[in-house]
Structures are given as C-alpha cells and as structure tokens.
Amino acid sequence: MSTKKDDKKAYKLMKFRAGIFQIKNLTNNKLFLKTSTDLDRAYNSDMFQLKMGLHSNSELQNDWNTLGADSFEFDVFDELKTSDSASELEINNDLKEFIKLHRTDLIEKGILLY
C-alpha cells in the first residue's frame, strides 16, 4: 500500500505534455495564448476564470461575456519537445522563449492576439 508521501513523489516524477494552448475567438479569429506544463489540463483554469468573470485578460473576458462560450474554441497551439531529464525550471524557461517566438511570428503575420 502506498503512502501519501509515495504518491506525491510519484506525481512529481510524472511527465506531462508541455507547450502552448490557445483560446480562439471564432468571431474575429483573435487568439489568446498561454503556456502550460500540463497541456492535457491546460484550459481548466482559464475556462473556470472565464465562466466566473475573473479572467486576468480583461479584453478576452469582455469578449467572452459579450459573445458567449460557444464563440470560443480551446486547443493545443504547439507542444514543446523536452528531454526526459529536463527540470521544471528548464521547461518553464523554454516555454517563455517558445511563446515569445510564436507571438512574434503571429504578429508578423497580422494575426490578432489578446
């Protein structure tokens, strides 16, 4: 039988898909991008914040309130490939650079971002 300590240790050793997820406004194709170290659960927090009217991005929140949930799509934008030995700090630093590159590329292409 495993203890809480064993379970916690096992959880810390688990590897999750890291990368960028997007919330896309289907009305104007505007994108909200956010990094996550767990893409499979990435949208849960933002979805909750939007439903409660508490999202940190006021422009996205306003559009959500005006247009409704059906006008938005949640997807993985891009996945970061990491080595098995990468630390959480290394992954977070890589994610910061990863999103900067994508944001710059999207802006150059004329895509609207929140």
Image (cartoon, helix red, strand yellow):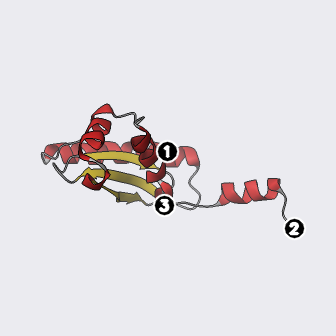
Closer to the eye: label 1 or 2? 2
Q: Can the viewer see residue 94 in this picture?
A: no
Mark 2 surroundings: few (<14), some (14-19) or many (≥20) residues within 10 A: few
Measure the alpha-carbon separation of dots 1 and 3.
16 Å
Specify the amino acid type for callout 3.
Asp
Secondary structure at badge 3 equals: helix
Q: Which residue in the rendered view is the most extreme toward the right?
A: 1
Q: Which amino acid type is marked by label 1?
A: Asn
Residue 59 percent location from the top left of the image: 27, 34
Residue 62: quarter of image: top left
Closest to the observer, 62 or 80: 62
In the figure, is residue 92 to the left or right of 7?
left
Residue 76, percent from left and from top: 36, 59
Which of the two discs, 1 and 3, sits closer to the camera? 3
Q: Secondary structure at mark 2?
A: loop
Q: Specify whether 92 is left or right of 63.
A: right
The reply to whether residue 10 is visible in this rendering is yes
Q: Residues within 10 Å of mark 3 (few under 14, many from 20)?
A: some
Label located before the other in sequence (1 or 3):
3
User: The C terminus lies in which quarter of the figure?
Assistant: top left
Residue at 16% across / 47% down in the picture?
111
The residue that disc 1 covers is: 92
Q: Secondary structure at mark 1?
A: helix
Pick the residue in front: 28 or 91. 28
- For the residues labelled 3 and 2, the Cα–Cα distance comes to 28 Å
Few, some or many residues within 10 Å of mark 1 (<14, 14–19, 20+): some
Q: Which residue is mark 2?
A: 1
Nearer to me, 3 or 90? 3
